[in-house]
Image: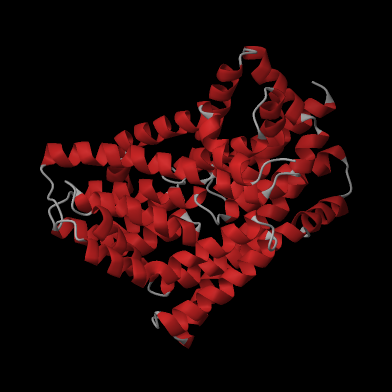
């Protein structure tokens, strides 16, 4: 066994060992990189330099602002207003509250950009409400968790910013636009399944449709929804960068939460800052250690090895895309989403572009794929939040989620093999010159 092969084994075996032992993923990545450097007798100072270089990127400045804006809007009363708007729009259907849950996630995801924030914020309101109306607790929680994945696709999404940073010359604006159709496709697929289940189990309808109520709730929630317009329109039309738009979104969210909805006080702002800093600390240490880990993978020529292995199975574009989807789905079950974006993008993106897949399209595929991983055991963060909010054991939720996994994979296949749907808005509004 040559020196390079031994180094690859050290890197991957120690990495897998730390994951199995439930080590914090950032530390697992960092320590496995250090051990491999020691074996190869590379200077350890290089690891430190790579970690600093990984976070010393201008576009990453948007990430803390987007996280903070999402926390502000989530704590500032926007959740209740979005639920009311969703109920007015679609609550009249059979299984109305399940539909409301999905549509509210579609709206709220465009503000929070986070699956866990969506589940925690909307779930505390909608899950008890659905139970009181006669819905099963498992079904109520599963609908909440599955629909929360829309928040990763509907802009602004800090995971999209991470992908754009790692991918290189990928437009954040085009990525934001590419997230809309996949998010809507996921919502439609989940609504179809929820309607079928609601009819089968005789779940109740909501109040009849009332246009006056729709207009009233729309007016009350418009201040929160404008956050999305500020960010997306500003970036798409070149009025400001993603970082500038994120900073503006924070200021706007603070004003709306304090002076318009008036559901956030100074003590609440401190709590928002604390939660935002906790999330940011996790993201930044992942970015820094993943930067060193990614360099080590490149040094050991792992991207070429993986590419040759995948291309050795088949040269058919659709088979290769299926293989990459399966790989991401499996990895998403055992690793954090941000870490996977940082580690897998340099490996898989060249393969995707080599078979003619647009980097923007691949970004949407990756984010949706890894979003499914957030609600799968054993390390799905959203799954844990759903369990905590509902009080239902993870084992029961995992079993109840099985049909939702099937529906989400169907949405993933549509997004993967219908590139025209994903690329329609980016090509229409931000065509490549």
Residue 5 placement (x, y as % from top left):
77, 26
> In the picture, which quadrant includes the C terminus?
top right
Residue 269 placement (x, y as % from top left):
50, 81
Tell which of 264 and 212 is nearer to you.
212
View extreme (bottom): residue:
266
Tell which of 282 and 428 is nearer to you.
428
Q: Is residue 66 above or below residue 7?
A: below
Relative horizontal placement of residue 32, taking residue 90 as reference (left or right): right
Count the labels in the image.
Answer: 0
> In the picture, which quadrant includes the N terminus?
top right
Residue at image position (63%, 54%) is 236
Q: Is residue 394 visible?
A: yes
Relative horizontal placement of residue 115, taking residue 278 as reference (left or right): left
Residue 28 placement (x, y as % from top left):
64, 48
The coloring applied to the image is secondary structure
Q: Is residue 221 above or below residue 324?
A: below
Residue at image position (65%, 46%) is 430
Residue 342 placement (x, y as % from top left):
66, 45
Q: Is residue 339 visible?
A: no
Residue at image position (74%, 31%) is 8
Relative horizontal placement of residue 218, taking residue 212 as reference (left or right): right
Residue at image position (39%, 79%) is 261
Tell which of 64 and 172 is nearer to you.
172
Res. 59 image quadrant: bottom right
Tell which of 186 and 146 is nearer to you.
186
Q: Is residue 9 above or below residue 290?
A: above
């Amino acid at each position: 066994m040559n020196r390079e092969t031994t180094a690859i084994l050290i890197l991957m075996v120690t990495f897998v060992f730390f994951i199995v032992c439930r080590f914090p993923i950032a530390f697992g990545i960092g320590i496995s990189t250090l051990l491999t450097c020691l074996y190869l007798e590379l200077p350890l100072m290089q690891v430190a330099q790579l970690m600093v270089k990984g976070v010393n990127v201008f576009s990453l400045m948007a990430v803390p602002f987007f996280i903070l804006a999402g926390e502000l809007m989530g704590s500032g009363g926007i959740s209740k207003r979005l639920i009311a708007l969703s109920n007015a729009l679609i609550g009249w259907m059979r299984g109305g509250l399940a539909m409301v849950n999905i549509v509210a996630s579609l709206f709220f995801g465009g503000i929070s950009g986070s699956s866990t924030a969506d589940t925690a914020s909307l779930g505390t309101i909608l899950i008890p409400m659905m139970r009181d109306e006669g819905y099963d607790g498992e079904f109520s929680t599963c609908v909440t968790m599955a629909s929360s994945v829309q928040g990763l696709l509907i802009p602004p999404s800090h995971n999209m910013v991470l992908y754009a940073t790692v991918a290189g010359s990928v437009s954040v604006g085009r990525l934001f636009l590419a997230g809309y159709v996949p998010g809507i496709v996921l919502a439609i697929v989940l609504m179809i399944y929820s309607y079928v289940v609601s009819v089968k189990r005789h779940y109740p309808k909501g109040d009849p449709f009332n246009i006056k109520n729709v207009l009233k709730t729309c007016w009350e929630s418009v201040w929160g929804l404008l956050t999305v317009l500020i960010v997306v329109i500003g970036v798409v039309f070149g009025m400001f960068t993603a970082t500038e738009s994120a900073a503006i979104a924070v200021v706007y969210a603070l004003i709306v939460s304090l002076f318009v909805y008036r559901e956030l006080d100074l003590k609440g702002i401190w709590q928002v800052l604390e939660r935002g800093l906790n999330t940011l600390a996790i993201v930044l240490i992942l970015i820094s250690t993943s930067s060193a880990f990614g360099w080590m993978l490149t040094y050991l020529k792992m991207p070429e090895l993986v590419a040759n292995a995948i291309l050795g199975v088949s040269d058919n574009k659709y088979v290769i895309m299926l293989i990459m989807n399966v790989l991401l789905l499996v990895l998403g079950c055992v690793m954090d989403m941000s870490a996977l974006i940082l580690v897998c993008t340099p490996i898989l993106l060249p393969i995707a572009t080599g078979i003619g897949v647009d980097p923007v399209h691949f970004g949407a595929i990756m984010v949706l794929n890894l979003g499914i991983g957030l609600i799968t055991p054993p390390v799905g963060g959203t799954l844990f939040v759903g369990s905590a909010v509902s009080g239902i054991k993870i084992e029961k939720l995992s079993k109840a989620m099985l049909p939702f996994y099937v529906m989400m994979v169907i949405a993933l296949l549509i997004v993967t093999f219908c590139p025209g749907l994903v690329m329609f808005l980016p090509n229409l509004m931000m065509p490549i010159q």
